[in-house]
Amino acid sequence: MAKNNSRKETLNNIVYSTNKDFNFEIESENLQTLPPQQQNLRIMLDKKHRSGKAVTLITGFTGSEDDLKELGKKLKSKCGVGGTVKDNEILIQGDFRDKIIEILLKDNYKVKKAGG
């Protein structure tokens, strides 16, 4: 997997401060969620580091963490399985590539089947 270089939190190059009263605050960007027609989602089957069990991996979502979690929750409920949202990716337990592509196309997302 490619490392995601876009960070929501910036550290302002502060490594250490000798000031006892220094209060480090993380600045967070308010990412605007792109409309579904502008999203380029990739759907792939992944078995790495999962004891041979398959998961459907959805990557390429551009937007806020809350919108990504909402989309993940919708896909999990439509497929009737578990999953998680982490590292800007949605993991759905099992091989549901075709069903997820169908669901996302109905919601006007641009979807591409990736991987083998």
Image (cartoon, rainbow, N blue to C red):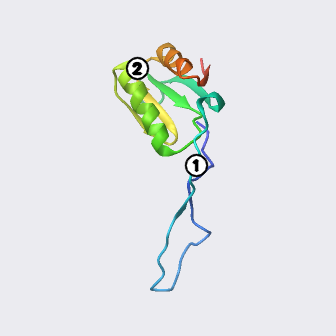
- Which quarter shows the N terminus? top right
Residue that carries the numbered disc 1 in the rendered image: 31
Q: Amino acid at mark 2?
A: Gly
From the top left corner, tell me how far across and down residue 63 is, in percent. 56, 42
- Does residue 33 lie above or below 115 as drawn? below
Name the residue: 52% across, 40% down.
88
From the top left corner, tell me how far across and down residue 34 is, in percent. 61, 38
Residue that carries the numbered disc 2 in the rendered image: 94
Estimate the spatial distance between the alpha carbons at disc 1 and disc 2, rounded to whole Å. 30 Å
- Does residue 61 lie above or below 17 as drawn? above
Q: Amino acid at mark 1?
A: Leu
- Does residue 40 lie above or below 25 as drawn? above
Q: Secondary structure at mark 2?
A: loop
Q: Nearer the viewer, mark 1 or mark 2?
A: 1
Q: Nearer the viewer, residue 48 or 110?
A: 110
Name the residue: 59% across, 25% down.
109
